[in-house]
């Protein structure tokens, strides 16, 4: 069946650049003769039928804004078969033939299931600050979040060095350590403690004994939020007990990392991916995510995108260590 009307939604945690992606999808679709509808609050809005007509002007003046004008949610109803059936019926009633879903791995998993169950053409865009989607070198929002981390660490560095303190800065990432690792490289932090590293290695003792104790009076350690790392509070607690000679402090950056105006890099990525999503649907592609690999836009089957099988390059931890000597 020929596609006439495309629905767009953003789902899961918001990410800076989602608006740039919405704008690119909407305008490229209209340019190519499609009708566009915006679905509010992610899959939740599909289940409840919150669907609005989108014109070219609906996406004016949003490229520079963080968050998502479509709002977002983590829908419980859509996890049930009954919810997804309701979503399909609402989608059909609104005349939507295909979907563009912008979100992280959870949202793409939902898209894959929905596409399989109801034979709906869906193209996904990786929108998450976590960068934990396979088949793409970067996700929309990751660069902006990294820059937010760098700004914060630059400020913390001033006070850390004045007081000669050890700072644990907890960053987001869900189960992944990309924000911690690359945030550490970009900010010149002394270490990154990430869940991808072998749990047999005591990353904290390693830091204290092989770096901090020898040459530094102050240090900043980026810690990925995760049970495996103990989080920043857990590590500070250990310092109190095991290395009481150090004066440790904790900063949890939290949802700060999700906000802000997207960087030029995220705007460009989102714009290119959004335009490519419409190209993909026009070519008859379905159940694929748009990824970027070595600078090339590629189609990644949903199954591969959500597999979590790609390995982080742990050699980069060595770079953090060497460069902070
Ligand atoms: O997936 C994005 C993310 O910000 C993760 O880094 C974090 O673990 C999670 O979302 C927080 O979710 P919420 O906004 O629902 O607290």
Image (cartoon, helix red, strand yellow):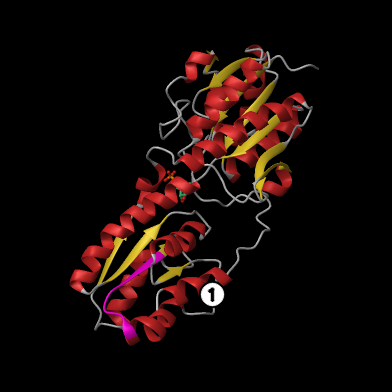
Q: Quadrant of residue 245?
A: bottom left
Farthest residue in the left direction?
163
Query: Is ligand 1 less than 8 Å from the beta carbon at label 1?
Result: no
Residue 91 visible to an observer of this rendering: no
Image-based side of 289 in relation to 239, left or right:
right
The image shows residue 178, relative to residue 293, as above or below, that is below
Residue at x 26% of width, y 58% of height: 155
Residue 291 visible to an observer of this rendering: yes
How many numbered marks are there? 1
Tell me residue 130's x, y (percent): 51, 50
- Is residue 270 on the magenta stretch? no
Residue at x 41% of width, y 82% of height: 205
Q: Characterize the local packing of mark 1: few (<14), some (14-19) or many (20 or more) Cα atoms within 10 angstroms.
A: few
Tell me residue 315's x, y (percent): 57, 72
Query: Image quadrant for the N terminus?
Result: top right
The image shows residue 155, relative to residue 14, as above or below, that is below
Residue at x 42% of width, y 34% of height: 67
Residue at x 40% of width, y 50% of height: 147
Residue range in magenta is: 215-222
The secondary element bearing badge 1 is classed as loop
Tell me residue 290's x, y (percent): 67, 39
The image shows residue 321, relative to residue 12, as above or below, that is below
Q: Quadrant of residue 229?
A: bottom left
* Residue under pointer 1: 199
Query: Image quadrant for the C terminus?
Result: bottom left
Tell me residue 66's x, y (percent): 41, 35
Q: Which residue is at the front of the view, 192 or 185?
A: 185
- Is residue 217 on the magenta stretch? yes
The image shows residue 114, relative to residue 34, as above or below, that is below
Q: Which residue is at the front of the view, 110 or 103?
A: 103
């Amino acid at each position: 069946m020929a596609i006439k009307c495309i629905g767009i939604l953003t789902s899961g945690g918001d990410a800076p650049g989602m608006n740039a992606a919405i704008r690119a999808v909407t305008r490229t679709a209209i340019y190519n003769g499609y009708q566009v509808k915006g679905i509010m609050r992610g899959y939740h809005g599909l289940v409840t039928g919150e669907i609005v007509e989108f014109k070219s002007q609906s996406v004016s003046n949003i490229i520079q804004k963080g968050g998502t004008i479509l709002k977002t949610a983590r829908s419980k109803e859509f996890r049930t078969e009954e919810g997804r059936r309701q979503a399909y019926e609402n989608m059909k009633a609104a005349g939507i033939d295909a979907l563009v879903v912008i979100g992280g791995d959870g949202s793409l998993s939902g898209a894959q299931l929905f596409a399989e169950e109801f034979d709906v053409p869906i193209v996904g865009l990786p929108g998450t600050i976590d960068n934990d989607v396979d088949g793409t070198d970067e996700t929309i929002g990751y660069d902006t979040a990294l820059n937010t981390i760098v700004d914060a660490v630059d400020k913390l560095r001033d006070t850390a060095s004045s007081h000669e303190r050890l700072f644990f800065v907890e960053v987001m990432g869900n189960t992944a350590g990309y924000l911690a690792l690359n945030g550490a490289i970009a900010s010149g932090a002394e270490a990154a403690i990430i869940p991808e590293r072998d749990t047999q290695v005591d990353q904290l003792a390693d830091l204290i004994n092989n770096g901090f104790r020898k040459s530094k009076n102050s240090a900043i350690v980026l810690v990925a939020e995760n049970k495996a790392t103990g989080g920043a509070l857990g590590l500070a607690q250990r310092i109190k007990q095991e290395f009481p000679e150090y004066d440790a402090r904790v900063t949890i950056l939290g949802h700060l990392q999700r906000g802000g105006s997207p960087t030029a890099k995220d705007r460009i990525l989102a714009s290119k991916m959004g335009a490519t999503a419409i190209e993909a649907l026009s070519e008859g592609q379905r159940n694929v995510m748009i990824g970027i690999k070595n600078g090339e836009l590629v189609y990644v089957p949903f199954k591969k995108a959500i597999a979590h099988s790609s390995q982080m390059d742990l050699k980069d931890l060595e770079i953090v260590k060497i460069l902070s000597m």
